[in-house]
Image (cartoon, helix red, strand yellow):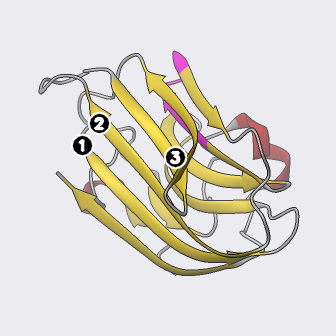
Amino acid sequence: STTRMPEFTAPALGNHNNTVTIDLECGREASGILYAMGGAGGGLTCYMDKGHLLFEYNLMIIDRSIAKSAEKIAPGKHTIVVNTALKAAKPGAPADIVLTVDGKEVARTTARMTVPAAFTASESFDVGTDLGSTVSRDYYERRPFKFDGKIKKVTVDLK
């Protein structure tokens, strides 16, 4: 139920190795935000759209790295894991982002560069919705794109 947590107080998901684990229950054709940080000028978002799981890393509008599951996620209870691994321990390093559902890899992408410090000074970290400006253009017309399932728990592990 976390919303509008200022980025400077939220976990540093944009520039650190991390694992985000989401325990949820979704219906058929599930849609909506699982979590989002930042906004249109830069950020990251994990969401579902008509049953597909997606992740987008928006590097200050300069580059957008997107992962989308080929198959739709079946209705029911699931554990979704988003693992971000920087390729070097330096500001701006590229990162591999892997999405798994119930332990099975469903999508991956590589952010060619990560944000060196923060995405914004005015946007936030949200769970279950993307308040403020939207990280992804894909759901701009549907903002705040509230998740239509149930998010039971979100766990962030910074490494």
Asked which quadrant contains residue 74, the reply is bottom right
Q: Which residue is mark 3?
A: 99
Q: Nearer the viewer, mark 3 or mark 1?
A: 3
Q: Which residue is mark 2?
A: 85
Q: Give above or below for 37 relative to 75.
A: above
Left or right: residue 132 compared with residue 159: right
Q: Residue at x 65, y 60 (%)?
A: 33
Q: Secondary structure at mark 3?
A: strand
Q: Earlier in the sequence, mark 3 or mark 1?
A: 1
Asked which quadrant contains residue 16, the reply is top left
Q: Position of residue 118 (x, y in %)?
A: 30, 39
Judge by depth and name the residue closer to the eye, 33 or 102.
Answer: 102
Q: Secondary structure at mark 1?
A: loop
Q: Residue at x 44, y 60 (%)?
A: 125
Tell me, yes or no, whether the two marked residues, 1 and 2, touch with CB atoms within 8 Å: yes
Which segment did they paint magenta? 55-63
Asked which quadrant contains residue 157, the reply is bottom left
Magenta stretch contains residue 25: no
Q: Position of residue 150 (x, y in %)?
A: 67, 81
Q: Give above or below for 84 relative to 114.
A: below
Q: Residue at x 75, y 38 (%)?
A: 70
Magenta stretch contains residue 61: yes
